[in-house]
Image (cartoon, rainbow, N blue to C red):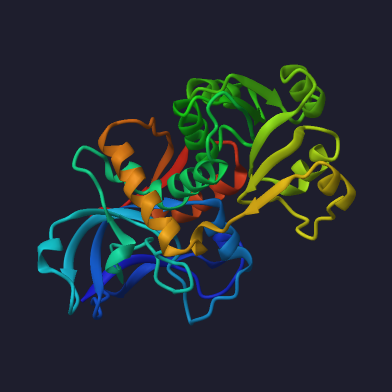
Amino acid sequence: MHMKAAWYEKNGTAREVMIVGEHPTPQPAAGEVRVALHCSGVNPSDVKSRMARPLGGPLIIPHSDGAGIIDAVGEGVDASRIGERVWTWNAQWQRPMGTAAEFVCLPSAQAAHLPDAVSFQTGACMGIPGLTALRAVHIAGDVKGKSVLVTGASSAVGHYVTQMLKQLGATVIGTVGSEAKAAHAKAAGADHCLFYKTEDVVARVKALTGGTGVDAIIDMDFSTTVQWMAQGVLRPHGHLICYGSNPPLDIPVNFRVMLFNSFTLSFFLIYDIPEDQREPCVLTLNDMLKNHQLVHSIGAEFTLDQVVHAHETVEAGKTIGNMVINIVH
């Protein structure tokens, strides 16, 4: 039995290394489910992995995020899960077989229930964008009445962060790269949008906060934000929550600034958060989906045959919204 899949056998550009073809259909091992995938989510980390992360096996079927229907279960998994709509997380984290295929097998816990009214396209945006946003907001704590700077407010993660912060009563100041991205962030609830390419972000933040700086920052680019922190963008005793950075990644930190402002710095890798932190995020995210509390943005849709185009679109960084691959059985 074979399935259609996309994979690569060496690192390189999408055009150089991506292969679309037939691959043996996986069978679920003990404790696993098999998901007949309807959608695969493509994230920046997927394209970075393809370019540079050592393979750890003869081939990689990429993408950690996806959504579909469980069609088989392994030993020890309740057979009642067969037929369940699910979304996946960590499908291709420290394992070679991700969601750019018609089927994926993975531990039962990594197939989270997808509420009936939620599309597979939306489900394929939950594993990395949805969970990263919610975990960051959880770390930020009580933000009611507080000001929060969201770097990349129109990004896949930032779009969800902005919505979640607004629902909790925060004032959201977002950095964006274009007028279109500003409109996208404002539609999600951003109170102010700053054009980081052309504006003095620090001066604007100080003007918007009466000179004090924001109470917290939810950050996707520590290499830039750490420089802003040294100039007063974050108030004393403020909190930076960071989930990513642009290169270079060997980033100097001004200890005196950090110490004398009593800053709190929190970093997390969404693939690697402990179960006692992840499980509440999965449950809360599903409640938000069920209650239609989030607006979702699909920027572009592709087929498996267009996987190279999908990766190149993510790398270009110009398309607003999440990238998904629709998989037809």
Q: Is residue 303 visible?
A: no
Q: Is residue 68 visible?
A: yes
Q: Quadrant of the C terminus?
A: bottom left
Q: Quadrant of residue 71?
A: bottom left
Q: Residue at x 56, y 56 (%)?
A: 45
Residue closest to the eye, 261 or 296: 261
Q: Residue at x 85, y 40 (%)?
A: 230
Left or right: 197, with 311 as reference point: right
Left or right: 69, with 207 as reference point: left
Residue closest to the eye, 279 or 329: 279
Q: Position of residue 169 (x, y in %)?
A: 50, 24
Q: Position of residue 244 (x, y in %)?
A: 64, 51
Residue at far right of view: 256
Say if 197 sits above or below 81 in the image.
above
Residue closest to the eye, 292 or 217: 217
Q: Quadrant of the N terminus?
A: bottom left
Q: Residue at x 27, y 67 (%)?
A: 108
Q: Residue at x 24, y 68 (%)?
A: 34
Number of dots carrying numbers: 0
Left or right: 191, with 1 as reference point: right
Q: Position of residue 95 (x, y in %)?
A: 44, 74
Q: Position of residue 11 (x, y in %)?
A: 60, 70
Q: Quadrant of residue 178?
A: top right
Left or right: 286, with 316 as reference point: left
